[in-house]
Image (cartoon, rainbow, N blue to C red):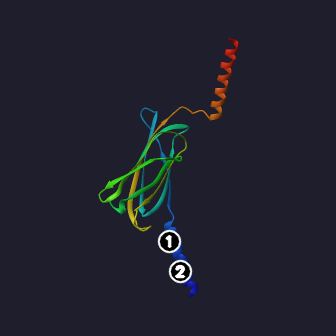
Amino acid sequence: MFHRLTLVALLATSAAAAQAAPVLAEQSVALQASKTGATQTATLKSVHTVAGEFIDTFTLTGLDGWAKINASLTTLGSTQVLDIDFVSASINGVAYSLTKSLLGSNPDGVETGSFVNTLLSAPLVLTVHGYAGAGLAAGTPINASYSGTFNVTQVSQVPEPASLALALAGLTGIAVSRRRKA
């Protein structure tokens, strides 16, 4: 009997620990070329059907090299079963600016994130950390979502620091040699 009670307690503890762990999700998002060809765009949507902590990772595909990024995230939730609370969001480790405002009786019912004119190198990886159904027990059925957009403009290759230093040394050498001849 003692062994059975121990097993039941162990299983209950394991189930609680599994619910407390953040839900991890990974997706690929394909950038689409615009008519001008200089800018690529993409959208994403993430739906969470159970309450609890999450970490969503999105890898943007279709880009090589350096690009200037403008992006946004938005969620609306007037009740707990519709609510997403952003803890953090970043692309390649560079943080979004997050804001919250009132929607109905929910003090953080509207949450937005902005990422403006940031130069980054591919691959671009967005990581969103948050809570779905804040205030509800982990595992409670909900239907909460957020969405995002990306505008990515490819830029000329940014030189590596070593290449830049070598070019600077060469230009300095040319300037010194011309000065000596004069």
* Rendered view: 35 above or below 129: above
- Name the image quarter holding residue 76: bottom left
Instruction: Evaluate if marks 2 and 1 touch, with contact meaning CB atoms under 8 Å apart.
Output: no
Instruction: Give the number of the disc on residue 8.
Output: 2
Q: Residue at x 54, y 72 (%)?
A: 14
Of marks 2 and 1, the one in the foreground: 1
* Residue lying farthest to the top in this orientation: 182
Q: CA distance from mark 2 to mark 1?
A: 12 Å
Mark sitting on residue 160? none
Question: Front-most of 155 and 88?
Answer: 88
Residue at horizontal 67 percent and vertical 26 percent from the top? 169
User: Where does residue 89 sit, x and y in percent of width and height?
Assistant: 47, 51
Taking depth in this image into account, of 29 and 122 the one nearest to the observer is 122
Question: Which comes before the other along the chain, label 2 or label 1?
Answer: 2
Name the residue at the left extreme. Answer: 104
Report if residue 77 is visible in the image: no
Packing grade of label 2 (10 A; few <14, some 14-19, many >=20) is: few
Q: Is residue 166 visible?
A: yes
Q: Residue at x 58, y 84 (%)?
A: 3
Q: Is residue 52 above or below residue 36?
A: below
Three-letter code for the amino acid on which mark 2 is drawn: Val
Tell which of 46 and 62 is nearer to you: 46
Q: Is residue 36 above or below residue 173?
A: below
Considering the numbered disc 2 on the image, is that residue within a helix, a strand or a loop?
A: helix
Badge 1 amino acid: Ala
Secondary structure under tag 1 reads helix
The residue under label 1 is 16
Question: Where is residue 161 drawn, in percent x and y?
Answer: 63, 34
Q: Residues within 10 Å of mark 1 (few under 14, many from 20)?
A: few
Residue 91 location in percent, x, y? 50, 46
Q: Quadrant of the C terminus?
A: top right
